[in-house]
Image: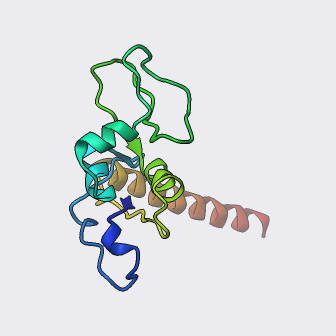
Amino acid sequence: MSALNPDLYNSPSKPLKDAESFAPDSDSLVGIDDVQKFLNRSRASVYRYTNSDPRNLNPPFNPRKLNPEFRSDQKDPLLFHSNEVARFAKDILRIKEVTVEVLNSPSTATQNILVSIHEELKLIRSNLEKMNNKEQQ
């Protein structure tokens, strides 16, 4: 997760007020609204910063612009990786301290099942090792 609110840069003891309101996807992509909040800029200025071109769906990386993630259709919303937003804030906007904070998202049903499977596999391995040790003795 990217916490890029400019109020946070000069006061490390200040709480991350936007951290709770932002729930990142598994790959930490953020939309225009979140970028606007994090950079404390207007929507129009965020669009001006963005490396986009109506004639080219995915223009090549431009180090002077805010580069969105790959899109497969012109109608897809612009999404930005949190590290790209942090890079842009630090390198281009000259924000001295940029904090990118990755928080664990709440467990999903899939994650819970995977944890259960992992525990079961560890138990099976432990039992197999015990059986192996008995056979060797």
In the image, is residue 60 above or below residue 40? above
Query: Seen from this angle, which residue lies furthest right?
Result: 136
Q: Is residue 31 in view from this perspective?
A: no
Instruction: State the image quarter where residue 112 is shown.
Output: bottom left
In the image, residue 137 lies at what x, y percent? 78, 70
Residue 122 vs residue 61, the one in the foreground = 61
Percent x, y of residue 43: 24, 43
Query: Which residue occupies the extreme left position in the image?
Result: 21
**Residue 39: % across, % down:** 33, 56
Which residue is depicted at the point 44% across and 33% down?
51
Image: 87 above or below 3: above
- Of 41 and 78, the residue lying toward us: 41
Q: Is residue 45 visible?
A: yes
Figure colour scheme: rainbow
Asked whether, in this view, residue 74 is left or right of residue 53, the answer is left
Q: Residue furthest top?
A: 55
Which residue is more in the foreground, 120 or 131?
120
Question: Which residue is pictured at 29% across the width and 79% down the height?
Answer: 15
Up-down relation of residue 81 to residue 75 (above or below)? below
Say which residue appears at 38% left-offset and 58% top-offset: 1
Residue 104 in the image: x percent, y percent?
37, 63
